[in-house]
């Protein structure tokens, strides 16, 4: 009897409170000063694979967000469509064969946000909650939703 009551209470507690990860959205964002208004999925893939993407006579720069492993994992799975090891190999191959430019890697969310805010050519990814209410940024699109 006690086990049934405890199990019922545990189930109710799990259903009652919202998950810390509920309804998270991974977004592509740029500086509010950026002339970029839209990037297609193929352009995002090319940019983060080190290929040249030009918009409004400006060469865009990818800034890779490693500050949260879930951000990077969701991005690789849902946008780049390859595992980490394949992504690293592809970056190396493109860099060596085509002279591509590897995305700058940021391990600190604060440093990443400051870098994007200060560079109109920078493009990055983050959780919507981290950039949505910050006037320094504009969100180009939702890449993935939990």
Image (cartoon, grey):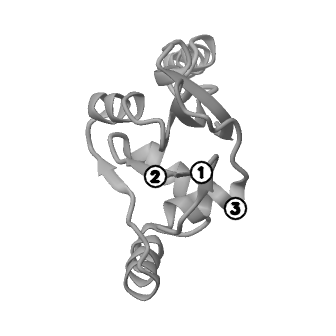
From the viewer's perspective, tell me whether residue 68 is left or right of residue 90: left
Q: Which mark is residue 62?
A: 2
Mark 2 surroundings: few (<14), some (14-19) or many (≥20) residues within 10 A: many
* Upstream in sequence: badge 2 or badge 1: 1
Quadrant assignment for the C terminus:
top right
In percent of width and height, residue 48 lies at 50, 60
The foreground one among 35 and 90 is 35
Q: Position of residue 90 (x, y in %)?
A: 47, 78
Residue drawn at point x = 62 percent, y = 65 percent = 81
Which mark is first along the chain, 3 or 1?
A: 3
User: Residue at the location (63% across, 18% down)?
Assistant: 15
Crowd around label 1: few <14 · some 14–19 · many ≥20 (10 Å)? few
- As helix, strand or loop, the secondary structure at mark 3 comes to helix
Q: Give the side of residue 25 with respect to residue 6, left or right.
A: right
| Distance of label 1 from label 3 (alpha carbons) | 19 Å
- Residue at the spot of label 1: 57
């Amino acid at each position: 009897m006690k086990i049934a009551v405890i199990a019922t209470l545990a189930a109710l507690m799990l259903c009652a409170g919202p998950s810390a990860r509920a309804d998270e959205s991974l977004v592509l964002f740029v500086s509010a000063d950026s002339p970029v208004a839209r990037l297609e999925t193929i352009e995002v893939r090319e940019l983060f694979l080190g290929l040249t993407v030009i918009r409004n006579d400006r060469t865009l720069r990818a800034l890779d967000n490693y500050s949260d492993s879930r951000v990077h994992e969701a991005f690789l799975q849902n946008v780049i469509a390859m595992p980490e090891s394949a992504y690293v190999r592809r970056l190396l191959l493109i860099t060596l064969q085509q002279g591509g430019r590897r995305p700058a890697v940021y391990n600190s969310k604060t440093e990443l946000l400051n870098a994007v805010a200060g560079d109109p050519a920078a493009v990055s990814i983050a959780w919507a909650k981290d950039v949505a209410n910050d006037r320094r940024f504009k969100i180009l699109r939702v890449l993935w939703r939990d």
